[in-house]
Image (cartoon, rainbow, N blue to C red):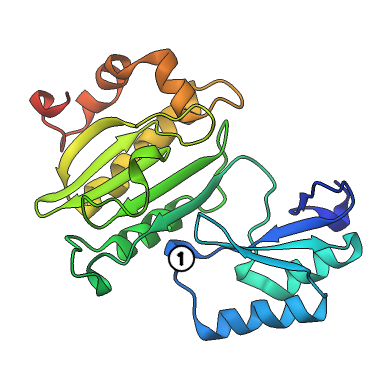
Amino acid sequence: MTDSTKGAILQRDGRTWAVTTRIPAGIVTPEQLETIAKVGRKYRVPILKITSGQRIVLAGLEPEHVQKLINELGPLAKPETAPCVKFVQACLGTDMCKYGKQDSIGLARAIDDKFKNETFPAKIKIGVSGCPRCCSESHTRDIGIVATPKGWTIFFGGNAGTRPRFGDLVARDLTSHEVVDCTQRLAEYYRSHANPHERTARFMERIGIDTLKSELLTLLPYIPVEKVK
């Protein structure tokens, strides 16, 4: 990767590049869409794709256009320079969905803000679902959060991929503030103990839930010991 393509992803053809937008909780304004459309037209981007993580990828960029496009996208651009939190996915929650039990969009934005510019041993994907229907695929995210009428349930170590794994149950009935704190502590524990390039699913398979309980979860005051199961 040269300086002119830093933050972009080399494509399958080995010649063109892709830039992914940063859209916390999948919420985008008309003005942001207009910006994306403008640069897409200007640099004749052949593919604009909405990803499974509620982002937009602009693919097929010529190398000399990459940095210009990133500069013009401004805060919308999300340079892929290191393993990081790829996205914090969210459903509509209580904003619009009749099934919503908690504010998934607000929580997703709060969590996204905490992880800006943070790096980890491998990429992290987070899903926040506003009800047990789990539209944000929370059970198979590195950190999965699911709402109930009583609060939030949090899972850790999920993965879709070629070796799918449901995340381990960490805690139930947490407040939004407690979820943000717990998410940060889980991520920090993972960063401190995981091997390079080891996703959370493989990390949890290696250390086991009992180790996570004894070394982290039992130290959190908002998780009663008897509920850490």
Q: Position of residue 102 (x, y in %)?
A: 20, 60
Q: Is residue 59 above or below residue 43?
A: above
* Left or right, 47 with reference to 165: right
* Left or right, 99 with reference to 115: left
Q: Dividing the image into 4 quarters, which one contains the C terminus?
A: top left
Q: Amino acid at mark 1?
A: Gly
Front residue (pair 134, 23): 134
Q: Is residue 137 above or below residue 93?
A: above
- Residue labelled with disc 1: 26
Residue at the location (88% across, 63% down)?
Answer: 62
Residue at the location (33% across, 54% down)?
Answer: 135
Residue at the location (49% across, 75% down)?
Answer: 28
Residue at the location (30% across, 19% down)?
Answer: 209
Q: Position of residue 46 (x, y in %)?
A: 78, 69
* Left or right, 83 with reference to 100: right
Q: Position of residue 127 (x, y in %)?
A: 38, 49
